[in-house]
Image: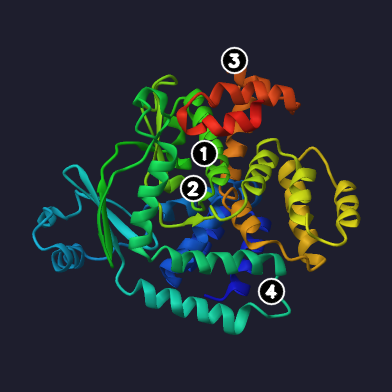
Amino acid sequence: MNLFIFLIKIIEYKLSRDKKSSILEIKNMLSDAGPIWQKFGQVLSYQEELIGDELARELQTFLVSCPTHSHEYSIKTMKEMFGDKYNVNNINDETLLGSGTIAQVYRIDEIVIKILHPNVREEIKRASKKYEDSIKNSFFFPKKLTIFCDFFFESLFAQLDMEKEYNSGVIIKDLLNHEDNTELQKIFIFPQMINYYRECIVMSYEECQPILLNCRDVIDKRVLFKACMCVTFFQLACIQKGFVHCDMHYGNFGIRNCLSYEDMKIVVYDFGLMVDERHSCQELRNDISHALAFNDIMEMASVIFKNNKNYDTHMAAIKKTVSQDFEKDFERLLIYTTMKSIEIDNSVFRMLGSCEKCKALHFIALELSTVPNMGEINDLTPIPDKNQMIKIFKDYLEYNEFVSLKKLLCT
């Protein structure tokens, strides 16, 4: 796919009066380009505040409804890897849970089977080579988008490693769900990893309701707000522990008991893009978690410029741009580092990048906070000060996954 033409189509959509036709053209362009560019569309769908609700809603369908490969291929692959160990003859339209850009997923009895699409490795290599050879270093290609695309293609290759995903699922479950805590003390549910091979992974089935834009309305608003808060805190807890989920989009988690504020749980079921930063010092992990939790752009800048010889100059420049809009301030900070050719430490960049997809949740939370009759949720507006934020945090940090995070943020 030609990224230049795609960017032009986005601009045309923003200016067009016929939004439906523009949306269809953009979606078809991504669909025709194959699963790798459908994944690109997924990432765009998180930017609801930038591309608009209509386009975001349509692009989010790529999360669970990408083109499927044949069930016969899935059965053949499973039998080659595991023989008759699993009841794979039941793989069909009824047991298909969804198809993403990298793989498709089936539910067989009480297990879930995730199988990579055929030829997906070759498609990623071709798309990556085209980007590296003819797009990345072009004078006309936005530098800000280059940073994003570098991470995008790197993440695609990472998601092909089924052994790594299996081990990541085991590690995150152990880090955040210790056996000495009862289920009542937990807000997150992680599937049990069962088996893996080069082309597939097998795990336990955990029931939940997705919160995609087109089905968000069926979820109680208080439950949705709680989910937004807790998923954001999940990302911060992951950063603090140094094992970071970098793909927490709507298609990779869901809500169990979506009608009950008290009994709701959040199920996380994709670990293909986990980044191990446990080698980073605890102070750095804590600083990033703290800055993101309190929307403190100056603290974030301090982390980025910490070892830069012109620290004071850079901090003074950023201070002049600070507003009360953390998202815009954060964007300005990244643009500043790009314009000044300041290299961000790789560990810092990965931990910051892990929260990119939570921006969408942040906007949902702010949107819900203005809904009448939402009780204490309305405490979020106007923009709360630090003490008010701590009060809000305490309501959502009572679960065992957030014990160390609560100590960091509320003491």
Which numbered mark, 3 or 2, is in the foreground of this view?
2
- Rounded to the nearest angstrom, the CA distance separating label 4 from label 2 is 27 Å
Kind of residue at disc 3: Gly
Instruction: Label 4, secondary structure: give it.
Output: loop
Tell me the residue that label 1 is attached to: 234
Which numbered mark, 2 or 1, is in the foreground of this view?
1
Residue 309 vs 359, above or below: the answer is below
Residue at image coords 51%, 28%:
226
Q: Position of residue 301 (x, y in %)?
A: 78, 50
Tell me the residue that label 3 is attached to: 375
Instruction: Label 3, secondary structure: give it.
Output: helix
Specify few, some or many for label 3: CA neighbours under 10 Å numbering under 14, 14-19, or 20 or more: few
Tell me the residue that label 4 is attached to: 141
Image marks 2 and 1: residues in contact by CB distance under 8 Å: yes
- Rounded to the nearest angstrom, the CA distance separating label 4 from label 1 is 34 Å
Give the quarter of the image for residue 189. top left
Tell me the residue that label 2 is attached to: 248
Q: In this rendering, would 357 be left or right of 15?
A: left
Quadrant of the drawing holding the C terminus: top right
Q: In this rendering, would 317 be left or right of 398?
A: right
